[in-house]
Amino acid sequence: MFNKERKAGRFGVGLVAIAASAALALTGCSGSTDDSTGMATDGASETMAGGDANLAITFLPKNLGNPYFDTSNAGGAEAIEEFGGTYEEVGPTEASPTAQVPFIQTAAQQGVGALVVSANDPEAICDALNEARDAGVKVVTFDSDTNPECRDLFINQATSEGIAQVQVDLITEQIGDEGQIAVLSASANATNQNAWIEMMQTELEANHPNVELVEIAYGDDDDQTSFDKTAALLQTYPDLKGIVSPTTVGIAAAARYLSTSDYKGEVMLTGLGTPNQMREYVEDGTVEAFALWNPADLGYLAAYAAQALITGEISGEAGDTFEAGKLGSYTVDEGASVLLGDPYVFDAENIGDFDF
Ligand code: RAM
């Protein structure tokens, strides 16, 4: 069972500093176009002193323009600056299965030291990632994994069980543990959301017999699509008691819809959101509580893991350990994965303490 109090201290203290440094890192960033590819790039690109190792590290989010990835990748940029590497961010505008492939190919052609990727689809980018690895690029997935045979390491934000559990706990508490609920997810193939939803279904079936999950809708991590899907769910299910949106894009769009509708305060909404996007909806009573982890720490840890792979300090074997700057020492688990920590619950009492 998720313990909100126990996690509060550690996360709360670190976050203020991280939010501040993320803000600093972001000040230097501006959108641009990579001349060699004609592709949109977003973020800082700076060369720094870095010894013999190829510490050019490219971050590839699911899509650009999502504040969650702006924060996670700013954490990556901060880490890369600390160890004297080169940070770049590239990515598609739409979170579709194959949209990331050309960016992977370009990074491989450029001969970067590592790619840090959040996958839109576990299969669709596999071949491109393995071709990049054959060309000497280390591949770290973070946030949303590929199939394990297509990467060197996965940086996991929290266990899937923990992420599923906290969302089921929140929604069932908010609706009085009975009635219809729907899920508003990201894209239909997203590895991370699909793993969490599957575990949420298992938990609902096992421990919440009076709660019925009537539909899983997909907003594709696109604001307008998520907004429209929220409207459709509410129209289709007049008895709907709650919506769980395990995506920061989806929950913010659903909250915006609910906040000006008659459903405000009647249909409960929870899931995974960023405090800055959700603040006004918590303050106006549309949303009671939601969860997330620290995206800046996730990106920061992924960057240090990439560095450790590039320098050969680790190979991705279970038991390998590496230092991740201010976050301290981490150990690689079975399945070549590294766990960041626990999810955290935000509500009216604590949301004012966070800025990301
Ligand atoms: C969105 C993305 C991301 C997910 C968060 C919770 O920003 O889908 O992959 O981890 O939501």
Image (cartoon, helix red, strand yellow):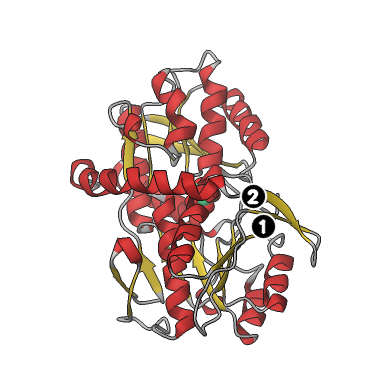
Q: How far across and down, in percent of the image, does residue 341 sit?
A: 31, 57
Q: Hey, what amino acid is under mark 2?
A: Leu
Q: Earlier in the sequence, mark 1 or mark 2?
A: 2
Element assignment for label 1? loop
Q: How far across and down, in percent of the image, does residue 62 sit?
A: 61, 55
Foreground pick, 220 / 341:
341
Quadrant of residue 325 within the rendered picture: bottom left
Q: Which mark is residue 91?
A: 1
Q: Which image quarter holds the C terminus?
A: top left
Q: Residue furthest front?
A: 49
Q: Residues within 10 Å of mark 2 (few under 14, many from 20)?
A: many
Tell me what residue is drawn at x 61 percent, y 53 percent.
43
Above or below, comparing residue 224 to residue 98 in the picture: above
Tell me what residue is drawn at x 67 percent, y 72 percent.
107
Asked if residue 243 can be seen in this view, the reply is no
Quadrant of residue 129 within the rendered picture: bottom right
Asked if residue 135 can be seen in this view, the reply is yes
Q: How far across and down, in percent of the image, does residue 93 sit?
A: 70, 50
Disc 1 + disc 2, Cβ < 8 Å: yes
Give the Cα distance between marks 1 and 2. Answer: 6 Å
Q: Is residue 84 left or right of residue 344?
A: right
Foreground pick, 186 / 137:
137
Tell me what residue is drawn at x 36 percent, y 57 percent.
158
- Beta carbon of the mark 1 residue lies under 8 A of ligand 1: no
Quadrant of residue 291 within the rendered picture: top left
